[in-house]
């Protein structure tokens, strides 16, 4: 019988895609995917540490795996959490049952570590401080599990050092992949039948390879083949008017923009080292709205950043009200050791909790209103799921629509007229 593996993934899309690469490595070694963790011969936990809750969950989860895993199975922990200063040592002390601890820079070598462990039976703890050659080592074999969508990394790391954020410390400096490699990856994926490609990077707008920019890359990915091109994440300081024009004209680019603002207060934005003001943010958003009045907008917002006052928070609510996002990811600020914000005066938990509750309620009403405005409009929906004749997909501006159809299949592009909205959920009919 084939030996099998089971992978748990925490964190962002980037990490989800990293896990597809880890699955590719394990498949290359002859392992198949296990249905249940208790059957697996290799268990990999791919971690996140962007907020404290993520870390606490990982520890709790490792405790459960200890009792579920079968004797002799190998447990490896990798990802952002192990990459923090002192974190690998803490993990090794707290969880004696973990066999392999590796970091984000050396996890592409998972195969070697597993072979070494199976050979010697000695626990391996090896976390590199950076990539070996400063290059973007890509794994050739990716085992994708994201349906009609395929993720493609265009760059790694981040140079922005927002004062709250751990990512630059655990993912290293920005490095962009060669443009020809990205183009050939995308061509291959389209030939394989993928209908949507999402380009990944912590700050895609600063993609830079030789003299090629992000705009050059997007232009090169225009194709006569029918597909949808998305990207994430953009940084407000680097988004250009050129991108708005290109998006408006493009046949392939989705008409949506995820532009994390984090706060609506200029004082807090400056403390966060975001390097833009709310006015500059509004200007950029208006430019996109001018070019594409029905553009889908989404954002990340953090409440309770050190020193945030009621006035600062009201500025955030005001910004949210003006922009009218159709999707908003809302977080409570979480202290990350080693970041500048960790040393700033902190807010109490109750204040932070009250603010997030207010923001969530506030945005819920906006999402409802934004959804109601879509009734009667016709969109091109890319179908991503179908169960019992009920189809689900997203429009070109990223709004989610469900509808009934017996003839439509997953992967089809169909014209759907929005018939009704229940809260923020849209239902439509094929036309
Ligand atoms: N590179 C992207 C995303 C980074 S992490 C960007 O710049 O937008 C995703 C989101 O997690 C961030 O946008 C931020 O809202 C949130 N986040 C990052 N660090 C955080 C922290 N210490 N506490 C709470 N939320 C955090
Ligand atoms: Fe973190 Fe800021 Fe970089 Fe995003 S841009 S990953 S929030 S440091
Ligand atoms: Fe992503 Fe979490 Fe790492 S958000 S980059 S997996 S710290």
Image: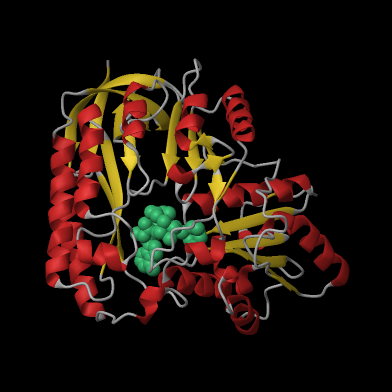
Which residue: 23% across, 76% down?
Answer: 307
Choose between 284 and 378: the one closer to the eye. 284
- Residue located farthest toward the right when viewing the structure as drawn: 119
| Position of residue 212 measured from the top left corner of the image (x, y, whole percent) | 54, 35
Choose between 186 and 177: the one closer to the eye. 177
Number of numbered tags placed on the structure image: 0
Indicate whether 66 appears above or below 388: below
For ligand 1, which image quadrant applies?
A: bottom left
- Residue located farthest toward the front when viewing the structure as drawn: 211
| Position of residue 431 measured from the top left corner of the image (x, y, whole percent) | 27, 15
Which residue: 72% across, 53% down?
Answer: 4
- Left/right placement of residue 124 relative to residue 61 reads right
Whether residue 239 is visible here, answered yes or no, is yes
Q: Quadrant of residue 412?
A: top left
| Position of residue 230 measured from the top left corner of the image (x, y, whole percent) | 43, 35
Indicate whether 125 appears above or below 413: below
User: What colour scheme does the image use?
Assistant: secondary structure
- Left/right placement of residue 295 relative to residue 57 reads left
Which residue: 72% across, 55% down?
Answer: 133
Whether residue 10 is visible here, answered yes or no, is no
Q: Quadrant of residue 209?
A: top right
Which residue: 32% across, 80% down?
Answer: 344
| Position of residue 198 measured from the top left corner of the image (x, y, whole percent) | 48, 37
Q: Quadrant of residue 42?
A: bottom right
């Amino acid at each position: 019988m084939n030996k099998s593996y089971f992978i748990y993934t925490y964190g962002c899309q980037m990490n989800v895609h990293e896990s597809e690469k880890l699955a590719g490595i394990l498949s290359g070694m002859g392992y198949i995917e296990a249905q249940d963790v208790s059957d697996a011969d290799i268990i990999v936990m791919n971690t996140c540490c962007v907020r404290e809750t993520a870390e606490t969950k990982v520890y709790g989860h490792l405790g459960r795996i200890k009792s579920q895993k079968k004797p002799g199975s190998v447990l490896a922990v990798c990802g952002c959490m192990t990459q923090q200063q002192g974190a690998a040592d803490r993990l090794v002390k707290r969880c004696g049952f973990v066999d392999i601890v590796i970091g984000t820079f050396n996890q592409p070598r998972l195969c070697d570590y597993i072979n070494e462990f199976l050979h010697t039976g000695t626990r391996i703890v090896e976390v590199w401080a950076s990539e070996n050659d400063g290059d973007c080592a890509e794994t050739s074999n990716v085992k994708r599990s994201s349906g009609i969508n395929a993720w493609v990394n265009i760059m790694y790391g981040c140079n922005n050092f927002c004062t709250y954020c751990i990512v630059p410390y655990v993912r290293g400096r920005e490095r962009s992949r060669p443009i020809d490699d990205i183009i050939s990856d995308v061509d291959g994926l389209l030939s394989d039948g993928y209908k949507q490609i999402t380009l990944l990077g912590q700050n895609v707008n600063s993609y830079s390879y030789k003299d090629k920019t992000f705009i050059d890359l997007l232009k090169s990915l225009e194709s006569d083949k029918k597909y949808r091109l998305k990207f994430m994440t953009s940084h407000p300081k680097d988004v250009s008017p050129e991108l708005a024009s290109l998006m408006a004209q493009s046949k392939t680019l989705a008409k949506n923009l995820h532009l994390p603002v984090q706060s609506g207060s200029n004082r807090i934005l400056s403390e966060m080292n975001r390097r833009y003001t709310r006015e500059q943010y509004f200007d950029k958003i208006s430019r996109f709205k001018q070019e594409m009045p029905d553009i889908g907008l989404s954002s990340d917002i953090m409440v309770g950043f050190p020193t945030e006052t009621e006035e600062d928070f009201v500025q955030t609510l005001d910004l949210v009200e003006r922009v009218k996002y159709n999707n908003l990811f809302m977080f409570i600020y979480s202290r990350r050791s080693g970041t500048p914000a960790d040393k700033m005066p902190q807010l109490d938990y109750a204040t932070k909790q009250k603010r997030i509750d207010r923001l969530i309620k506030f945005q819920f009403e906006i999402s409802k209103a934004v959804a109601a405005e879509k009734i009667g409009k016709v969109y091109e929906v890319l179908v991503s799921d179908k169960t019992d004749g009920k189809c689900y997909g997203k429009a070109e501006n990223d709004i989610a629509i469900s509808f009934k159809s017996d003839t439509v299949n997953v992967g089809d592009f169909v014209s759907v007229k929005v018939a009704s909205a229940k809260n923020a959920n849209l239902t439509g009919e094929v036309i």
